[in-house]
Image (spheres, rainbow, N blue to C red):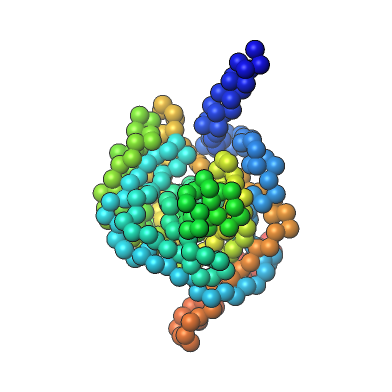
């Protein structure tokens, strides 16, 4: 009897784990966010959080280094995994190093959230792209998820524009092949060639903090790098993602996790040290920061 009970329990745990999801905010804006269990409920270093300029520590690091991000990827795979649209299958190792990172990280996959998970100065953006990297000293993602230096995610926020985003557009072109429920978890080839660079704006200024995966298991293994520079996207483009199905005739209208407590963590606003004196770039950087601070001042006056 005990044995059977254990089997039943494991089965229940398994099915619960595969059925985690998001509230459908289009149907009911007040639907409470579901409990995902485990670290997701008990962790103290969870993501996402609100990033605010005024509460951040000032940091200066050497530049982040990107290798092969400019390479055009001709054979990217796309999958609707029921929680997001995910890209993988990079031709060569895309390696991230430098900044405050202690070692080399390679890109594992890219996926998106609509609306954004992180907010900046309490402002939510229509889209957030996550470029998920694994620390090369660990052989795979499940191993890396056990260590606090296991994973680095670059978060890129997109702002509303009336000009379609070309890179996002080339992903959307292949969406029709994965939108339906019966196409879920079936990988398809991204028709357009895409360089990961095309998804990344300036990396001169960013927030960094120690956090977690924003989906179960919510492992606290992530060094977050959320860029303050944003890319444009139209609401029509974002709405295309909202049409993907996670159940028969059920569309994934939103897939962002609710904000988590900061719990006195250090959130650092990094101004990347410039390798060479370049007046033009520096003035651009200061302008970006002033704009960001301007938002903070405006908000405090409300
Ligand atoms: Zn994500």
Quarter of the figure with the N terminus? top right
Q: Is residue 114 visible?
A: yes
Left or right for 246, reference 11: left
At horizontal 56% and vertical 66% (from top left) the residue drawn is 102
What number of labels is visible?
0
Image-quadrant location for residue 183:
top left
Image-quadrant location for residue 4:
top right
Q: Residue furthest right?
A: 264
Image-quadrant location for residue 41:
top right
Image: 138 above or below 180: below
What is the x, y in percent for residue 82? 44, 36
At horizontal 61% and vertical 55% (from top left) the residue drawn is 148
Q: Is residue 129 visible?
A: no
Left or right for 267, reference 285: right
Q: Residue furthest top?
A: 1
Left or right for 32, reference 176: right
Image: 195 above or below 110: below
Front in this rendered view, residue 1 or 55? 1
Front in this rendered view, residue 233 or 37? 37
Front in this rendered view, residue 175 or 97? 97
At horizontal 38% and vertical 36% (from top left) the residue drawn is 185
Image: 10 above or below 69: above
Quarter of the figure with the C terminus? bottom right
What is the x, y in percent for residue 52? 64, 62
What is the x, y in percent for residue 5? 63, 17
Left or right for 76, reference 151: left
At horizontal 59% and vertical 48% (from top left) the residue drawn is 146
What is the x, y in percent for residue 195? 33, 60
């Amino acid at each position: 009897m005990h044995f059977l009970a254990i089997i039943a329990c494991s089965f229940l745990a398994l099915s619960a784990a595969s059925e985690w999801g998001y509230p459908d905010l289009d149907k009911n804006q007040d639907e409470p966010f579901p409990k995902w269990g485990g670290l997701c409920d008990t962790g103290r270093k969870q993501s996402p959080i609100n990033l605010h300029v005024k509460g951040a520590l000032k940091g200066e690091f050497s530049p982040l280094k990107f290798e092969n991000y400019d390479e055009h990827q001709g054979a990217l795979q796309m999958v609707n995994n029921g929680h997001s649209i995910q890209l993988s299958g990079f031709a060569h190792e895309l390696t991230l190093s430098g900044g405050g990172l202690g070692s080399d990280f390679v890109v594992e996959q890219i996926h998106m959230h609509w609306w954004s998970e992180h907010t900046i100065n309490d402002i939510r953006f229509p889209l957030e792209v996550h470029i998920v990297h694994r620390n090369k000293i660990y052989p795979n993602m499940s191993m890396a998820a056990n260590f606090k230096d296991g994973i680095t995610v670059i978060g890129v926020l997109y702002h509303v524009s009336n000009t379609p985003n070309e890179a996002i557009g080339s992903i959307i072109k292949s969406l029709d092949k994965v939108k339906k429920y019966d196409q879920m978890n079936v990988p398809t080839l991204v028709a357009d060639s895409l360089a990961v660079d095309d998804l990344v704006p300036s990396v001169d200024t960013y927030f960094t903090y120690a956090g977690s995966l924003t989906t179960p298991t919510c492992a606290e293994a992530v060094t977050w790098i959320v860029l303050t520079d944003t890319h444009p996207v139209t609401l029509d483009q974002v709405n295309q993602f909202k049409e993907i199905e996670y159940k028969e005739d059920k569309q994934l209208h939103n897939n962002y996790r609710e904000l988590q407590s900061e719990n006195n963590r250090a959130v650092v606003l990094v101004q990347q040290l410039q390798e060479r004196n370049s007046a033009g770039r520096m003035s651009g950087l200061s302008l970006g920061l002033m704009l960001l601070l301007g938002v903070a001042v405006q908000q405090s006056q409300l």
